[in-house]
Image: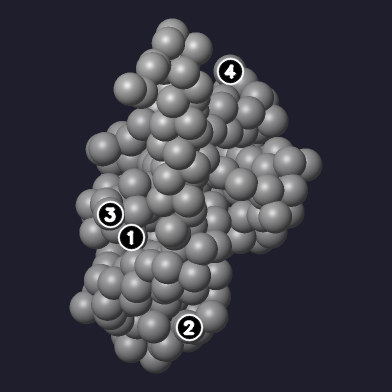
Amino acid sequence: MLSINRYSIFTLFIIALGGWLLYNRNHSQSYGTLILISGGSSCGKTSVSKALQDHFAKKDIPFLRIGLDDFFHAIGNQWFASALDATKESTKRAKGLLIKKTEENIIIETGPFYPKLIQAVTLGLKGFLDGKLNVIFEGASDFSGIKIALQKYNPFLFSIACPLNIVEERESKRKDNPIIGLARAVNTQNNFTKKTERIFDSSKQSSKDIAQEIAHFVEEHTILIPE
């Protein structure tokens, strides 16, 4: 007759627990982890994304860092134009994103090509995740649609905010030839708070501190395995 004492039960429990943890560890790595960072222009998204990438790199957990602007720059003025630096002809042809400056403010308009680009970006992110690559994707856009489209991958969405007066001051000090007034336009014409896990104010926390809080949240809700 089989005899089971409390020590045997404890051993079986440990074996079962170990098996469950191993299953979840492997299951969680069936695809990569996606961290979306959204927010207005000059809010500090890129600085936070770099700090977040560095945080994980110190733990031997690689993350690709991609920006929505990378796709804009890759396509060129025939699809994405600024009335400040584009020719009149290219401005007329711009079917993706057009930045126009009026006497009062700056207006951002999207054309029929813009949603096609966002759809292609979403499919590209899906490819990275299916390839078990971790991605940090940042941009001055509402990423709630991307989060919904990729919900099977359990993406994380965080928003970086900042008071408008501070954003405009940062914009004036940028060295990458900023369009003055763009920060106000982006921050007032978009909603970056939909379906976000947390909202951070970059005027009250450093990029490194925000990155550490984001990393802590992600590490609490998924398993990231060092390479």
Q: Amino acid at mark 4?
A: Lys
Number of numbered labels in the structure image: 4
Question: As rendered, which of 170 and 135 lies closer to the eye?
Answer: 135
Residue 47 sits in quarter: top right
Residue where numbered disc 2 is placed: 75
Q: Secondary structure at mark 4?
A: loop
Closer to the chain start, of discs 3 and 1, is: 1
Quote the CA–CA distance across marks 3 and 4: 33 Å
Quote the CA–CA distance across marks 3 and 1: 32 Å
Q: Residues within 10 Å of mark 4 (few under 14, many from 20)?
A: few
Q: Amino acid at mark 2?
A: Ile
Viewer can see residue 86: yes
Q: Are marks 3 and 1 in contact (CB under 8 Å)?
A: no
Position of 17 with respect to 176 (left or right) is left
Residue 78 sits above or below residue 220 on the image: below
Residue where numbered disc 1 is placed: 108
Closer to the chain start, of discs 3 and 2, is: 2
Residue where numbered disc 3 is placed: 152
Q: Nearer the viewer, mark 3 or mark 2?
A: 3
Closer to the chain start, of discs 4 and 1, is: 1
Looking at the rendered structure, which numbered label has been put on residue 204?
4
Q: Amino acid at mark 1?
A: Ile
Residue at 40% x, 61% y is 101
